[in-house]
Amino acid sequence: MDETTELMKRLAPVERKKPLLPAITPQAELALLCRVLFKEGYNDHIAGHISYKQPDGTLLMNPWELAWDEVCADDILRIDAETGKVLEGDWNITPAVNVHVEIHAARKDDVRVVIHNHPRFGSVWASAKRVPPIYDQSSAMVDGDIRLYDEYRGTVEDDSRGQSASESIGDAKWALLANHGVLVVAGSIPQAYLRAATLEWRCRHAWHVEALGGGQPLDAKVAQETGARPDKNGFPFFWEAEARRQLRAHPEVSSSVA
Ligand SMILES: [Zn+2]
């Protein structure tokens, strides 16, 4: 039995009768991820795009025209993973779809979800060209270095720029794109939510600590050990709690997909 299973058994000895989330489609999962991240600060108007690789190799993506807090399951597009062309759906795809095509091609084994947006605090640190220190436990829920990609050559619509955005993340989980925003990749929706939420939390918290004159960052080894476990398993219950909150307030999000 691994450490996580053992801990879960100790914390939740009673067998759950009720699922943490109702059965929902992958399109509904993606619509919910857009909405919960909007609330976390991924809310630069209509900016940002998320792709979610499916078992058949296609990508689900949010539409270009909609803000992340208004996306429903039946707005989600299906995209050809090699050409970036829309296969299903009634909206347009972002011109930056090539970033997703490149990253999914480069990270076939460990990445199913790719997120790009301009959350306020992530973008502030990216513009300052600094990686925020970890000042509290909630900032340490994900381990691993944040890449700082110090090159802004314009928006990412053309192929070479898409490729450079994909190179910016390399084999990392997350990157700050100088003078632009953030890139986060993950193996699942819960892990994607944990990584994106932790990144913005860490950037916001460090901003506040440094505005007060600074503090003592967590010891690097402690921070690494703190984040290794929750990041690996997507921190059970974390994603589901926020997804349920959205579903209670906006049951239309999971509207059926034909
Ligand atoms: Zn952008």
Image (cartoon, grey):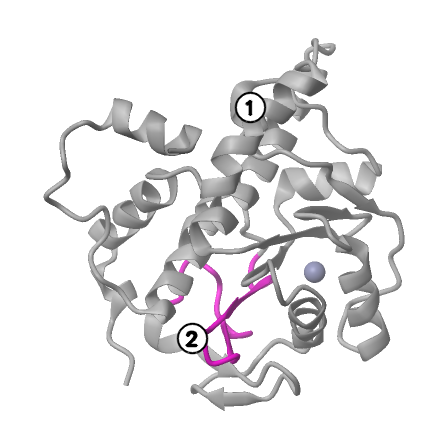
| Residue on which disc 1 sits | 226
- Asked if residue 74 is positioned above or below residue 35 in the image, the reply reads below
Q: Position of residue 247 (x, y in %)?
A: 25, 54
Q: Is residue 26 visible?
A: yes
Q: Is residue 214 above or below residue 21?
A: above
Question: Image height check: is 3 above or below 257?
Answer: above
How many discs mark residues in the rendered view? 2
- Magenta stretch bounds: 45-71
Quadrant assignment for the C terminus? bottom left
SS at mark 2 in the image: loop
- Residue 148 part of the magenta-drawn span: no
Residue 232 in the image: x percent, y percent? 51, 41
Give the residue at mark 2: 76
| Quarter the N terminus occupies | top left
For the point 62% across and 55% down, the residue is 117
Amino acid carrying label 1: it is: Thr
